[in-house]
Image (cartoon, helix red, strand yellow):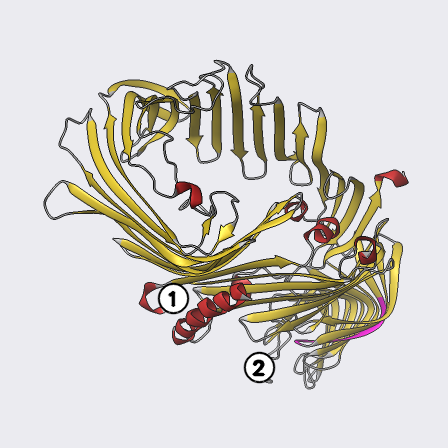
């Protein structure tokens, strides 16, 4: 309740300034959120009157009231252009009887037929063995198409599709239908076919034909799985003007899983957009684990950049009634592998010298025994960026926050202030010396009992100060010319770095409730501490005037030493030195990155940890590899482990066939934790995706998935089967 109250408080303040900042909405929502284009017609009359123009190879007869024209006949009148092999024109009534290869063009739309009886003034008539092409890659054909008025067509024995009309990969076939422009197509006796194979039939369907986004039912989705049975999904689309819409969805599963969902989107102004998605599901298996049978989830995202006073607002809420259920139920890999749930709402302002952030958030960390919850209800954070004091070489900065915090067993107020004062000494370019002093004061209304380690209602404060001296250099560099990877000049820089830190005694450190980095800053374990490293950098520059130089590679070796006794006096072999770390980072381009690191224990003098990260990103292909390993040492402080995560995708046959893979592998146990393999094919107007997934959470699951999608329709069929079924 406290989180809800806090978030409502932030939202109330947010909406107060939000409403006062609104301007007349003009951008359409489809500019931000892509929407499948609906086919449209444009046979609006240009008005009566005008002169009929024609061209022909020969004329059979021309009299006062009619003309009979043959051979490559072209008739033009107002915005209509008609061509045919033979045309009879009644000059007085403007009636046309066209035969053989008839084509009628009006605007961007085209009708073709073997024969057409058409009135040039009213733009109505009947076409036989006709075809029609409309914007949005929608094609019609029928044994007869009647244009009843300016906006209405009657279709007999018809077909419509987004594919090649001569040999469509998929099509909807109807016995009769009435299509009203900027309204709906009401179709009877409709069957969906793949090539010539009928897949399903319905006696009646209403299809929107409005030029803009229109109210109506979307094409139903079908699926099947061993776990949930046969699935039918029905969606209803509701536009709210030009800047908002809502989609309502109902899902039926033969095994008893029934769901209702809503998806609302809005873009009232250029700097404002939002989306709410929610779903409620009836779970018939809830009695097996004792949970509630009604389960739900929702997400709400809102951003607004045009708030008064230079503020920006962001709302990002996510919540689940039962995370394990949605791990089973949702096909999204991110949901299946989610480890925490995070929601936040904040107002923020960034100026040249400071930033102000008012924030409420909730983080639920999922663990094997349940979950750990951390909430800010809300907090105010104020930061001053480094500012120069007059004409001196002194710079000051500030970090501060105040707010109510809550976790599973604590509910308290915390205030924190963290000022810093640094001095930038004048030195040669190859040397930098920067002394810094800082202090920190934090106040808590609750604390940890030193004996029981339980939260008690006793206020404490924590104070400490630090003095730092950072020295970079003397630096050495060398410039080399060459041609490698598009770069022409390279600069190799060698920089030794030393940082000395003196920390005063931290008062009440053991009684502080751990919530975030304010409570757990990176403090040395000893009073006097020195960290030294050697950094090698490669800076590259491309040819051409004005080309900028950037760092493409760095290699760092780093270690720290205590000047006041062992770093960890409780270890088996206490020593004044920390482990040695090696780090290699390379970013030769925006699409390529490489990171590698290793840690050698000072006590074990053996490799204890190593990691590797590789990212390649192309226009159609991607590759992302993560590897992390720990190694057992003589002191038995660590155990061997090695995990690999891989995500990759590549086109196999141009833009038609592509493959994607995603897995997590425990190399030490020689076992996959999660794996997904996807093969997708995209036709000219359809697509098919085959997938094998093997998930270990929450329960071991091996499934095959086949999904079929259609152009301008979306996913029509989704079939899931357990691997044990084969």
Q: Is residue 134 visible?
A: no
Q: Does the magenta segment cover residue 674?
A: no
At 56% from the left and 76% from the top, the residue drawn is 241
At 63% from the left and 46% from the top, the residue drawn is 334
- Residue nearest the viewer, comparing 673 with 110: 673
- What residue span does the magenta drawing correspond to? 174-182
Where is residue 618 drawn, in percent x and y? Answer: 54, 36
- Residue nearest the viewer, comparing 550 with 357: 357
Q: Is residue 566 visible?
A: yes
- Indicate whether 288 appears above or below 129: above
Where is residue 167 drawn, in percent x and y? Answer: 80, 52
Q: Does the magenta segment cover residue 180?
A: yes
- Residue nearest the viewer, comparing 176 with 618: 618
Q: Which residue is mark 2?
A: 50
Quadrant for the N terminus in the image: bottom right
Q: Which residue is mark 1?
A: 306
Where is residue 38 drawn, in percent x and y? Answer: 66, 65
Q: Is residue 525 left or right of residue 285?
A: left
């Amino acid at each position: 309740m406290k989180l809800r109250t806090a978030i409502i408080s932030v939202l109330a303040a947010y909406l107060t300034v939000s409403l006062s900042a609104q301007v007349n909405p003009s951008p359409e929502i489809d500019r931000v959120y892509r929407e499948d284009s609906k086919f449209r017609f444009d046979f609006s009359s240009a008005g009566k009157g005008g002169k009929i123009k024609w061209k022909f190879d020969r004329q059979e007869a021309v009299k006062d009231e009619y003309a009979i024209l043959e051979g490559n006949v072209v008739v033009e009148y107002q915005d209509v252009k008609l061509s045919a092999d033979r045309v009879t024109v009644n000059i007085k009534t403007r009636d046309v009887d066209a035969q053989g290869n008839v084509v009628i063009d009006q605007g961007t739309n085209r009708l073709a037929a073997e024969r057409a009886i058409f009135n040039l003034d009213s733009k109505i008539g009947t076409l036989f063995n006709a075809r029609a092409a409309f914007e949005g890659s929608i094609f019609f054909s029928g044994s007869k198409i009647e244009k009843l008025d300016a906006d209405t067509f009657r279709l007999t024995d018809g077909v419509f599709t987004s594919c090649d009309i001569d040999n469509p990969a998929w099509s909807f076939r109807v016995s009769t239908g009435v299509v009203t422009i900027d309204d709906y197509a009401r179709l009877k006796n409709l069957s969906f076919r793949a090539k010539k194979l009928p897949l399903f039939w319905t006696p009646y369907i209403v299809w929107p034909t409005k030029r803009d986004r229109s109210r109506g039912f979307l094409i139903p989705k079908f699926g099947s799985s061993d776990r949930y049975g046969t699935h039918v999904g029905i969606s209803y689309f509701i536009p709210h003007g030009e800047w908002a819409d809502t989609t309502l969805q109902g899902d039926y599963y033969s095994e008893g899983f029934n769901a209702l969902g809503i998806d609302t989107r809005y873009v009232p102004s250029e700097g404002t957009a939002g989306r709410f998605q929610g779903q409620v599901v009836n779970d018939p298996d809830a009695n097996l684990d004792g949970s509630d049978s009604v389960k739900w989830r929702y997400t709400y995202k809102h951003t607004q950049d045009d708030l008064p006073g230079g503020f920006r607002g962001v709302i990002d809420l996510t919540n689940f009634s039962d995370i394990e259920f949605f791990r089973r139920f949702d096909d999204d890999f991110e949901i299946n592998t989610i480890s925490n749930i995070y929601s936040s709402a904040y107002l923020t302002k960034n100026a040249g010298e400071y930033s102000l952030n008012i924030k409420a958030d909730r983080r639920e960390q999922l663990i094997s025994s349940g979950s750990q919850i951390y909430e800010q209800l809300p907090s105010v954070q104020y930061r001053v960026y480094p500012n120069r004091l007059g004409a001196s070489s002194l710079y000051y900065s500030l970090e501060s926050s105040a707010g109510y915090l809550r976790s599973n067993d604590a509910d308290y107020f915390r205030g924190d202030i963290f000022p810093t004062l640094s001095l930038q000494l004048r030195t040669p370019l190859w040397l930098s010396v920067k002394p810094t002093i800082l202090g920190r004061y934090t106040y808590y209304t609750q604390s940890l009992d030193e004996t029981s380690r339980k939260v008690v209602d006793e206020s404490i404060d924590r104070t400490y100060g630090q003095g730092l001296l950072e020295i970079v250099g003397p630096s050495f560099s060398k410039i080399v010319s060459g041609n490698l990877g598009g770069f022409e000049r390279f600069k190799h820089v060698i920089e030794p770095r030393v940082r000395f830190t003196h920390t005063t005694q931290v008062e009440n450190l053991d009684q502080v409730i751990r919530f975030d980095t304010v409570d757990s800053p990176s403090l040395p374990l000893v009073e006097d501490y020195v960290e030294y490293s050697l950094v090698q950098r490669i800076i590259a520059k491309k040819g051409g005037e004005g080309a900028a130089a950037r760092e493409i590679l760095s290699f760092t070796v780093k270690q720290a030493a205590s000047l006041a006794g062992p770093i960890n006096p409780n270890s088996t072999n206490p020593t004044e030195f920390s482990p040695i770390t090696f780090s290699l980072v390379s970013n030769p381009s925006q699409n390529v990155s490489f990171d590698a690191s290793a840690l050698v224990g000072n006590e074990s003098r053996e490799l204890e940890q190593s990691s590797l990260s590789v990212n390649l990103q192309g226009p159609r292909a991607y590759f992302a590899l993560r590897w992390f390993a720990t190694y057992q040492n003589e002191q038995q402080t660590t155990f061997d482990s090695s995990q690999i995560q891989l995500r990759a995708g590549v086109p196999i046959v141009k833009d038609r066939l592509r493959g994607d893979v995603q897995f997590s592998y425990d190399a030490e146990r020689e076992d996959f934790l999660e794996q997904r393999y996807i093969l997708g094919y995209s036709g000219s107007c359809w697509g098919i995706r085959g997938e094998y997934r093997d998930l270990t959470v929450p329960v071991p699951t091996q499934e095959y998935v086949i999904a079929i999608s259609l152009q301008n329709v979306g996913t029509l069929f989704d079939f899931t089967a357990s691997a044990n079924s084969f």
